[in-house]
Image (spheres, rainbow, N blue to C red):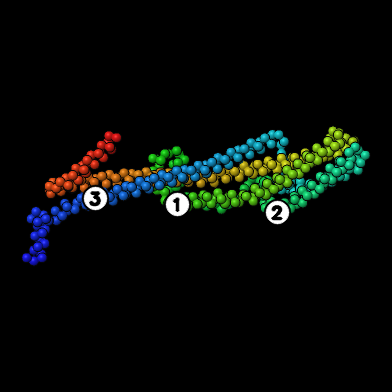
Amino acid sequence: MGIASKLKALQSSETGGEPKTILDRVIANTPVVMTVVATILAGLSSGEMSTAQYNRAMAAQFQSKAGDQWSFYQAKRLRASGNQNSIDLLEGLIAPGLLDAGAIATQAKNNESRIAVLGALLPSIAQAPNADALTAAIELAEGKESASASKWKAALADPQIQEAMVYLSGDGLPTIEEQHAASPAIGELLAAIDAGKNETETVDLVRKVDRKDLDAAEAAANANANAFDAATKPMVASIARLAKLAASDAAMLRGLHRNLASMAGVSPAAGSDPVANLLSRAGNMQQMQDEFLASLSTARLRLDARRYQQESAYNSGVARLYEVEVRRSSGLSDRNRLRSRNFFYGMLVAQAAVTIATFSLAVKQKSFLWGVASTAGLLAISLGVYVYVFT
């Protein structure tokens, strides 16, 4: 007997004396194929669920970022409102005058000779009590005023301060070249969010938003906010420098007037008394400096209110795009979760096919082990149905 004859005889003995047909091979391999399919579907289901969890976590992260931007927006709007309230209070109490670059320059020039006017009155109080102390106080103030005058001269020569004074006395703000990258799909979704539509109602709109378009829109919104902040920083620093000089002068004149009054021991009313005249002059200088400081503070508050309004607008633009990110990530998470569930159902069907095929083989082959495997498979399917339906 040849080798081929021996192989046919062996095959016939393994299959009950009959060679396997194509159908027999298909039936025999069906459990294996269905097991592979079930494993693939289980992996896909697990992967989709992991992606759904990732997207849900990203939605929470974007919601936190949106909350930060809305907090910035609210804080700056409150600052703008607070500045306006302070303006109303100042205008009701002291009626500060309008401030422009010419008024600031005039005030700075007058500062150079204010104390010298008081110094010219010193000979008239030579016979007054505490004349030496009064003279020393005025000479000390002259030294402080000379140093302040040098600072004012340097400040007014600074180009940044010259530019800042234009904004301080006007209604404008530094401008930037704004970037715009919002797509029609993003605009449509933003309109729906502004209209109060929930996530379910915006699912179709979310799917239209392209990832690249959203990235570009966020980059443009953040660039606008950062550019405006960079453009206003020199202006804010320059005006703070002017305010510091004006406050220092006011403090010096208040201290001088208070010291002169305490040393002279007379009321500061104008009259023929040389000391009273000196105190009156010092009091007038203090009042004029306080009025200038009030005008400068009011103009600064107006400018800051405008700046905060603009900054809050840029912050709200960034926050609204993060709200789009939240909707998009939530929508993707729901989609991945649905896909995971469907893949899981597919896996269950494949597992049922494995069990049925195994059971059919057990019946055909009359195999005890195949029967045990089939029974275990049926029990597993029954348990799954019970858990899904009744628990």
Q: Which residue is drawn at 52% across and 44% down?
A: 69
Secondary structure beneath dot 1 equals: helix
Name the quadrant of the C terminus. Answer: top left
- Return the x and y of residue 134 as percentages of the image width and height: 86, 41
Which quarter of the rendered picture does the N terminus lie within? bottom left
Q: Looking at the image, is mark 1 or mark 2 earlier in the sequence?
A: 2
Q: Is mark 3 on a helix, strand or loop?
A: helix
Res 35 label: 3
Query: Mark 3 is on which residue type?
Result: Thr
- At which x and y percent is residue 237? 66, 49
Image marks 1 and 3: residues in contact by CB distance under 8 Å: no
Q: Residue at x 58, y 38 (%)?
A: 78
Q: Residue 158 carries which label?
A: 2
- Name above or below for residue 151 compared with residue 263: below
Q: Distance between the residues labelled 1 and 3?
A: 43 Å
Badge 3 or badge 2: first in the primary sequence: 3
In the picture shown, does residue 288 fall above or below 175?
above
Look at label 1 and name its amino acid: Asp
Q: Which kind of residue does numbered mark 2 sit on?
A: Asp
- In this rendering, the count of numbered labels is 3
Measured in 3D between alpha carbons, the distance from the residue under mark 1 to the one under mark 2, in whole angstroms, is 43 Å
- Please indicate whether residue 79 sits to the left or right of residue 247 in the image: left
Read off the residue under disc 1. Answer: 213
Which residue in the rendered view is the most extreme toward the left?
A: 1
Residue 64, position as x, y percentages in the image: 48, 43
Q: Label 2 near label 3: C-beta < 8 Å?
A: no
Between circles 1 and 3, the one closer to the viewer is: 3
